[in-house]
Amino acid sequence: MLLGKRLRRTRSRVTLLESVYPLLVPTPEPGTHSLQSRKQDPMTDTTLAPASAEASVRPTVREIGIIMNGVSGRMGYRQHLVRSILAIREQGGIELPDGTKVTVKPLLVGRSEAKLAELAAKHGIEDYTTDLDAALADPRWEIYADFLVTKARASALRKAIAAGKTIYTEKPTAETVDEALELAKLAQEAGVKTGVVHDKLYLPGLQKLKRLIDSGFFGRILSVRGEFGYWVFEGDWQPAQRPSWNYRAEDGGGIIVDMFPHWNYVLENLFGEVKTVYAQAAVHIADRWDENGEHYTATAEDAAYGIFELEGDIVAQINSSWTVRVNRDELVEFHVDGTHGSAVVGLFGAKIQHRNATPKPVWNPDLADDHDYDADWAEVPTNDVFQNGFRQQWEEFLVSYALGTEYEFDLLSGARGVLLAEAGLQSSREGRKVELPTLSLD
Ligand SMILES: NC(=O)c1ccc[n+]([C@@H]2O[C@H](COP(=O)([O-])OP(=O)(O)OC[C@H]3O[C@@H](n4cnc5c(N)ncnc54)[C@H](O)[C@@H]3O)[C@@H](O)[C@H]2O)c1
């Protein structure tokens, strides 16, 4: 199993490296039909009949129908619909290695018909429904994509798997590891392909970090220190910038369930498998006000202070907080120290300090230190063109789906993220370090 995990990580490195060089961002070709102007209903295969010799060299375009559930939410709308699916559709699809293309057609799904109608009209989308069961029963829609609140996810995924749909979902994939693993097993038994959002791996800063690691820059990596967070307003004198369910445990909230799944795939894909976790959760602010200005008592932690032991004797320490005022360059930063060099990376930026450029401070509390420590760091240049990470992953997933290749960031990977969250909560409850078991589908 351990070997299996190592193999998986090796493959994912390839995936990440490929993502540094986007598969392509093609401009629509004259022969490629716009989805909106299409009159026929060619859901699964829209190979266009050549009308002339010139047309016969046109690439064929396969249109993939995607059920987008929870599309009116923050992530569903901005990152998945607008920045990813509509952007892919507008660019004319994604080119496959054989020169053919795949493009996408969204079916908007939600609970409010009025909201869906408004979104559909705003973006020129033909299809929307409040009837998920009917959407799942319709073979025109091949992929089920889920951006619901965490609490509603597992039951919807179960239905979609039973309907034989390919799955693409936000994290966390479930609220408990038992449920997350059950979903991964159900998908395996049903033979459906699955993908889980691993967006942080696609951040430009983390891609630069990946390149530093692969180049051997660090020597032996010793430790990783991550700082994530910002101040989320309480909601009384300024509206909160996150949904109120995030602060209610009974509604699937809490920063551990939200962020530890991210930390798991970041740590395991960049540094090594997580072996143990010690976490201290805190509800720093108990009084909050919801979207309607109503007071509620927060029942889920708004900060978590975690220490993670990784394979290779690497110690990672990550603070996650919605109750911290930012005094760093970016909303997330990772500081990595190795025997030969160190790096500090954020969402976009990355700076490094080599062992040969390392100053030699001497501790002396009696003397003000006028050394400019910031000046000891060199900026890593942006040598690549980075596109939105959610879209980049969607493109990789769609290509993998169209080609029928193995996809690394699947429901089992998602379940490992849920495992870390569950172990983190257990650690905080019990005040002790918790070892992580190896998850398997067997
Ligand atoms: N990848 C990331 O960086 C990232 C960031 C934030 C949130 N997320 C995840 O995305 C998911 C959505 O988060 P969000 O911030 O967009 O939340 P949101 O509250 O803005 O949107 C949630 C969506 O779910 C729908 N919904 C709410 N309750 C429902 C119910 N009982 N049944 C069916 N639908 C329901 C809402 O109508 C809305 O469309 C969460 O699982 C969250 O953990 C991921």
Image (cartoon, rainbow, N blue to C red):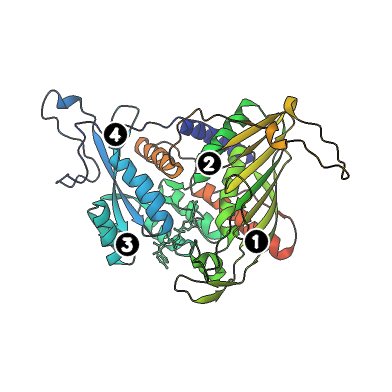
Question: Helix or strand or loop: what does disc 3 sit on?
Answer: helix
Amino acid at circle 3 = Leu
Q: Is residue 161 left or right of residue 409?
A: left
Q: Is residue 88 left or right of residue 442?
A: left
The span from disc 2 to disc 3 (Cα, nearest Å) is 31 Å
Q: Which residue is at 29% across, 32% downward? A: 27
- Residue receiving disc 2: 201
The span from disc 1 to disc 4 (Cα, nearest Å) is 44 Å
Above or below 328: residue 153? below
Q: Which residue is at 46% across, 35% downward? A: 386
The quarter in which the N terminus is drawn is: top right
Amino acid at circle 1 = Leu
Q: Which residue is at 15% across, 33% downward? A: 49
- Residue receiving disc 1: 425
Dot 4 or dot 2: first in sequence order is 4
Mark 2 CB near ligand 1 (8 Å cut): no
Dot 1 or dot 4: first in sequence order is 4
The span from disc 2 to disc 1 (Cα, nearest Å) is 24 Å
Please tell me in which quarter of the rendered image ligand 1 is found: bottom left
Dot 3 or dot 4: first in sequence order is 4
Can residue 166 be seen by looking at this rendering? no
Question: Helix or strand or loop: what does disc 4 sit on?
Answer: strand
